[in-house]
Amino acid sequence: MTAPPPTRQTARQVLGRLSLPERNFVADALRTETVGGVLLLLAAVAALAWANIPALHTGYEAVSHFRLGPGALGLHLSVAHWAADGLLAVFFFVAGIELKRELVAGELRDPRAAVLPVAAALSGMAVPALVYTLTSLSGGGSAQGWAVPTATDIAFALAVLAVIGTSLPSALRAFLLTLAVVDDLFAILIIAVFFTDRLNLAALGGAAAGLAVFWLLLRRGVRGWYVYVPLAAVVWALTYHSGVHATIAGVAMGLMLRCTAREGEEHAPAERIEHRVRPLSAGLAVPLFALFNAGVPVSGAALGEVFTRPETLGVVLGLVVGKTAGIFGGTWLTARFTRAQLSEELEWADVFAMASLAGIGFTVSLLIGELAFDGGAVATGEVKAAVLAGSLIAAACATVLLKARNARYRRLCEEEERDEDLDGIPDVYEQDDPAYHLRMAAIHERKAAEHRRLAAERAAGTRHGLAEVPGGAGEEGDRPA
């Protein structure tokens, strides 16, 4: 008896359709980020106008450098400083929750699924750093800004999508979100490792003790913002005085939240808290940071220096060229060497367009630029201008590439959203459910019955009209028609 031929294993898909719970989570998260991204975009435009209109420039400088806070605690800081170290801690708190969720219940839970976004994020940070370093050193510049073009700003990228009216399929959006989460993780590590000059061990120990108390309270199920908010403020202040960048405190607390729901819980604590804090982060913290950090002088001479100084040119090329090449190359190589296939609904041109969109590095890039060039040879304002220029060029390139594919994206999104049986679940997720097909059969039978009724009415109307023709059909009076 001849043995049956071996069955061919189905290749693992890259950027395939999401599960329904993951799709719903991504849609909710990106909806808030899109609104926040539009506010971020408006704040950046307002900052540029405020800083460059002669009559308003002095006011911008006065507000940015206005100092407030308890001096006795060493926290008498400028408004711009509070925005960078204080408000961004809220942003990184949400980033910590997102990272924890991805590790526990998202794409990063499965090592095989995590390989692609991790590899894409790593290459999407390594290649921009390499592009910056080669550009800067070949022009006789400094290598200290190598980390500036490594970050992706998911909110700004989504704002660009909202402005240009392009809707990415959910698989590409989820990949962009996961990529940004991993990107944020490595950006956090870069800030913690490379931008910590000195350590105050006493303050660091106090921050660690505060985090331990935070964790114990969570484990015991203690609830109430009036407990956690003051404790978080103490941990943040101790972290600030420890020499470690204060935003790390936000990440640490976000990672401590539980992301799985227990019996009797409708939502996990992390989900509840993220639902409350994300609008504060996207709608207030990040736009205010942009307002007091994106106000750089814009003139022909200033823009000319962006493209002539080796450091600033390295930032622009790192964002525009390095990010695109790194993310696309990392994705393609990972798929190639893991023998995975791209989803049939997408093409590599879509991945390239998405990679160019990830070249928008705004919030974290501005923060790293301040840390890298504080007191250095290159003015921080010039680095900020380079980040703005690079992000705008990347946005323009992504707009052209995405618009070219927009008709296909629209069809894919309509297919993903179609719900003909009106049960609240898109039809593409019910193809294996017999009940769905029975509902659709009933719907089609009702439609067929309605069409038969209309056909009968039309036929009856036609016969009635012919019967009323004088002299019989086909005649006009007594003569042939």
Image (cartoon, rainbow, N blue to C red):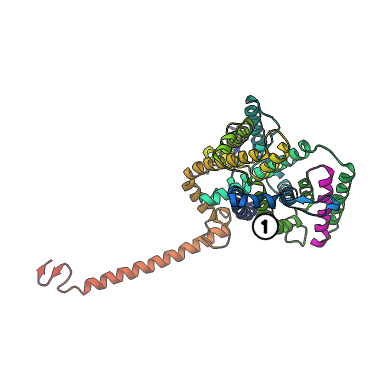
Across and down, in percent, residue 446 comes to: 46, 66
Toward the viewer: 16 or 31?
31
Q: Is residue 148 above or below residue 68?
A: above
Q: Amino acid at mark 1?
A: Pro
What quarter of the picture does the N terminus occupy?
top right
As for residue 148 lying within the magenta part, the answer is no
Q: Residue at x 62, y 28 (%)?
A: 135
Toward the viewer: 468 or 335?
335
Magenta residues, start to end = 223-245
What is the chief secondary structure element of the magenta stretch? helix
Q: Is residue 306 above or below residue 77?
A: above
Q: Is residue 94 visible?
A: no
Toward the viewer: 432 or 25?
25
Q: Is residue 385 above or below residue 43?
A: above
The mark tally for this picture is 1
Toward the viewer: 36 or 262?
36
Q: Residues within 10 Å of mark 1 (few under 14, many from 20)?
A: some
Residue furthest right in the image:
202
Q: Is residue 351 left or right of residue 211?
A: left
Across and down, in percent, residue 303 comes to: 57, 38
Q: Is residue 449 above or below residue 242?
A: below
Helix, strand or loop at label 1? It is helix
**Quarter location, residue 191:** top right
Q: Residue at x 61, y 54 (%)?
A: 39
As for residue 234 lying within the magenta part, the answer is yes
Across and down, in percent, residue 248 comes to: 78, 45
Query: Residue at label 1?
Result: 279
Across and down, in percent, residue 96 comes to: 74, 48
What quarter of the picture does the C terminus occupy?
bottom left
